[in-house]
């Protein structure tokens, strides 16, 4: 089971648009084969900071996500909203 | 809905014991009222780094977790296993 925590900082003027695009992405992603989690988290301390919590049964399922129409739409939609490059950190989910 | 990401670095000699204690804690925690997630994540880059992904329906549910026997047992069991103080970061789960 493979987890990625994607850490994102958004330009303040794009917070609402980023949330809308990311919720659209999450709604489609949870329907993918092998998806276990696709949670959109907004920092309580800094509303411009987000974490996408993505969990898939296999590494192949996670790779396939990057080829979906909804991922590619999200990627292009939010590209100019980011205040800095996003960072994806990989984990094993020990109880997923 | 309230999410906490607890970032933990464990002394290398305690990795297996930490995993055992944390999986015991997670098994009981997911049975709590209001619990939505209690995932135990181990870094793919550094096996001494962990994240506990804890999500509860309300702030009160999250506070109640800190009073459970299984949380208190976990806290005392892992206290000497940590290489540095753990850090809990709060988020709102926008699609939970």
Image: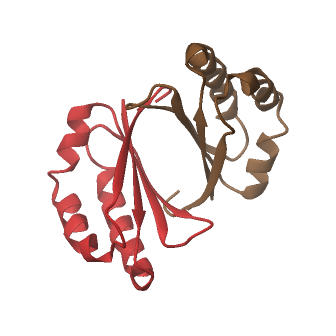
Chain colours: A brown, B red
Name the residue at 62% across, 20% down: A18
Q: Is residue B27 left or right of residue A75?
A: left
Name the residue at 49% across, 72% down: B48
Compare residues A34 and B66 and report the one nearer the observer: B66
* Residue B54, horizontal then vertical, whole percent: 38, 46
Quarter occupied by residue A90 = bottom right
Compare residues A76 and B65 and report the one nearer the observer: A76
Q: Is residue B29 left or right of residue A38?
A: left
Q: Is residue B56 left or right of residue B47?
A: left
The image shows a total of numbered marks equal to: 0
Name the residue at 77% across, 27% down: A70
Establish if B25 lies above or below B38.
Answer: below
* Residue B75, horizontal then vertical, whole percent: 23, 65
Q: Is residue B22 left or right of residue A94?
A: left
* Residue A10, horizontal then vertical, whole percent: 60, 26
Farthest-out residue, bottom: B13
* Residue B33, horizontal then vertical, whole percent: 25, 40
Compare residues A9 and A51 and report the one nearer the observer: A9
Quarter occupied by residue A65 = top right
Question: In the picture, which quadrant includes the N terminus of chain B?
Answer: top left
């Amino acid at each position: 089971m493979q987890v990625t925590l994607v850490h994102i900082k958004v330009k303040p003027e794009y917070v609402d648009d980023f949330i809308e695009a990311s919720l659209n992405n999450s709604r489609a992603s949870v329907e993918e084969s092998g998806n276990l989690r696709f949670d959109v988290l907004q920092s309580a301390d800094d509303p411009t900071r987000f974490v996408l919590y993505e969990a898939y049964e296999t590494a192949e399922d996670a790779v396939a996500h990057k080829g979906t129409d909804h991922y590619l739409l999200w990627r292009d939609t939010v590209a100019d909203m980011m205040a800095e490059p996003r960072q994806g950190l990989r984990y094993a989910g020990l109880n997923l």
